[in-house]
Image (cartoon, helix red, strand yellow):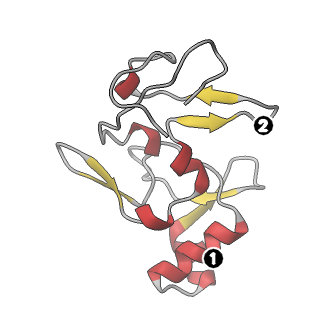
């Protein structure tokens, strides 16, 4: 994948769960889709599984109060797996990349590519 930063981005997920810290915003569609997948009425899903960002405007999956990890992350000693992988939010699908609100792509904190856009592992598509 071209990065626009003079190189190609190479990445192979190590299943560390680092991208699942401080989960991003849910769109209305993602909120409804995840609630439906879990078989939860939407008001209950909102109460039990979501929280507002500090700005009080945007909704995101609830975080574990001790670790900051997304409530849907199942983390063992050796790997981390998303409990709603097939229905995960779009910002999770982009990890370790993130869209910059003013344009472009941000490179998130991810040990799989050793920092920077050079990366290691197999190339993404």
Seen at 64% across and 15% down, the residue is 5
Q: How many marks?
A: 2
Residue holding disc 2: 101
Q: Secondary structure at mark 1?
A: helix
Q: Would residue 42 be found to the left or right of residue 20 on screen?
A: right
In three-dimensional space, the C-alpha distance between marks 2 and 1, rounded to whole angstroms, equals 24 Å
Seen at 70% across and 62% down, the residue is 27
Q: Position of residue 98 (x, y in %)?
A: 62, 37
Determine contact: label 2, label 1, CB under 8 Å.
no
**CA neighbours of label 2 inside 10 A, class few (<14), some (14 to 19), many (20+):** few
- Do we see residue 113 in this rendering? yes
Q: Secondary structure at mark 2?
A: loop
The one nearer the camera, 77 or 100, is: 100
Residue holding disc 1: 32
Instruction: Looking at the image, tell me whether mark 2 or mark 1 is earlier in sequence order.
Output: 1
Numbered tag placed on residue 24 in the rendering: none
Seen at 43% across and 26% down, the residue is 10
The one nearer the camera, 55 or 35, is: 35
Q: Position of residue 4 (x, y in %)?
A: 67, 20
Q: Residue furthest right?
A: 102
Image quadrant where residue 104 sits:
top right
Seen at 54% across and 73% down, the residue is 34
Q: Position of residue 25 (x, y in %)?
A: 65, 53
Q: Would residue 113 be found to the left or right of residue 8 on screen?
A: left
Image quadrant where residue 106 sits:
top right
Relative vertical location of residue 117 with respect to residue 19 in this rendering, above or below: above
The one nearer the camera, 124 or 37, is: 124
């Amino acid at each position: 994948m071209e990065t626009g930063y003079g190189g190609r981005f190479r990445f192979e997920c190590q299943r560390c769960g680092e991208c699942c810290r401080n989960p991003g915003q849910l769109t209305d569609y993602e909120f409804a889709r995840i609630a439906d997948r879990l078989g939860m009425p939407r008001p209950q899903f909102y109460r039990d599984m979501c929280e507002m960002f500090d700005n009080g405007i945007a909704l995101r999956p609830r975080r574990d109060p001790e670790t900051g990890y997304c409530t849907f992350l199942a983390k063992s000693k050796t790997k981390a797996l998303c409990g709603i992988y097939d229905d995960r939010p779009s910002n999770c699908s982009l990890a370790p990349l993130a869209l910059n609100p003013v344009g472009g792509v941000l490179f998130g904190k991810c040990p799989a590519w050793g920092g920077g856009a050079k990366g290691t592992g197999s190339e993404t598509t």
